[in-house]
Amino acid sequence: MPKDYLEIAQNLDLIDVEAAAKVVGSRFGFLKNELVLLQFALINYVFNTFGNKYNFVPVLPPFFIKPKYFEALGYIDTKEGKEETYYLPQDDLYLIGTAEHIIAAMNGDQTFDEKELPKRFLAFSSCFRREAGSYGKDTKGILRVHQFDKIEMFSICTPEQSQKEQELITSIEEEIMQNLMIPYRIVQTSTLNLSRPSARSFDLES
């Protein structure tokens, strides 16, 4: 019978969800041994291969964001949005759910000359999500976890440039999958499943 990724990873001592559950709680995991080295190798591969090629500014951002920026981005202006985030009331700060949030805030309160655009950023960060609305769905192993790492491609552009920029980012994701020889398909997200700030979204499923 075929083994799933978690069984394979546990047999190879690459993922430990039991120790994480003991010291933190459910929906966390320790990555170990070769899997850690693989993650850093993939991060280096993406930054070294695509950063200069497509004129991205590399960024390693803070993991916290002020409420006024988070709300302006359209992520905590509803009850459901707030339930998905981690909030530190003593500091009046939120933990970011993706580097997209903090890169947008980094460029907030600025006016760009159209000749400067598009401005592209390539950011690596840990991401934090409560996944409050996903109980019982894909919860085995390290799927739908509360903390994970991600590289984000972010572009500031004019409305007229936006479709071309999104297509460029999708093509870069495709190039990564093709270079790594990972089978994939592109799925356009239905309007019902779009996040509230999004006008159009594509997922690469592998």
Image: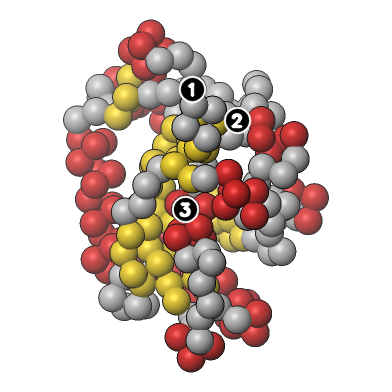
Q: Secondary structure at mark 1?
A: loop
60 w.r.t. 163: above or below: above
Residue 28 seen in the figure = yes
Q: Amino acid at mark 2?
A: Glu
Q: Which mark is residue 131?
A: 2
152 or 184, which lies in front? 152
User: Disc 3 versus disc 2: distance between alpha carbons?
Assistant: 19 Å
Left or right? Give the position of 49 relative to 80. left
Q: Amino acid at mark 1?
A: Arg
Q: Which mark is residue 102?
A: 3
Q: Please provide percent x and percent y for residue 60.
A: 31, 54
Q: How is the image coloured?
A: secondary structure
Q: Secondary structure at mark 3?
A: helix
Q: Amino acid at mark 3?
A: Ile
Residue at 49%, 26% in the rendered image: 90
Name the N-terminal-most of marks 1 and 2: 1
User: Disc 3 versus disc 1: distance between alpha carbons?
Assistant: 24 Å
CB under 8 Å between callouts 1 and 2?
yes
Name the N-terminal-most of marks 3 and 2: 3
Q: Please provide percent x and percent y for residue 65.
A: 49, 45
Residue 4 seen in the figure = no
In the displayed orientation, state which residue is furthest to the right. 192
Q: Secondary structure at mark 2?
A: loop
130 w.r.t. 37: above or below: above
Residue at 62%, 33% in the rendered image: 84
Q: Please provide percent x and percent y for residue 30.
A: 32, 24
Residue at 62%, 77% in the rendered image: 163
Badge 2 crowding class, 10 Å Cα cut-off, few under 14, some 14 to 19, many 20 or more, is: some
- Closer mark to the observer between disc 3 and disc 2: 3
Name the N-terminal-most of marks 3 and 1: 1
- Closer mark to the observer between disc 3 and disc 1: 3
Residue identified by numbered label 1: 27
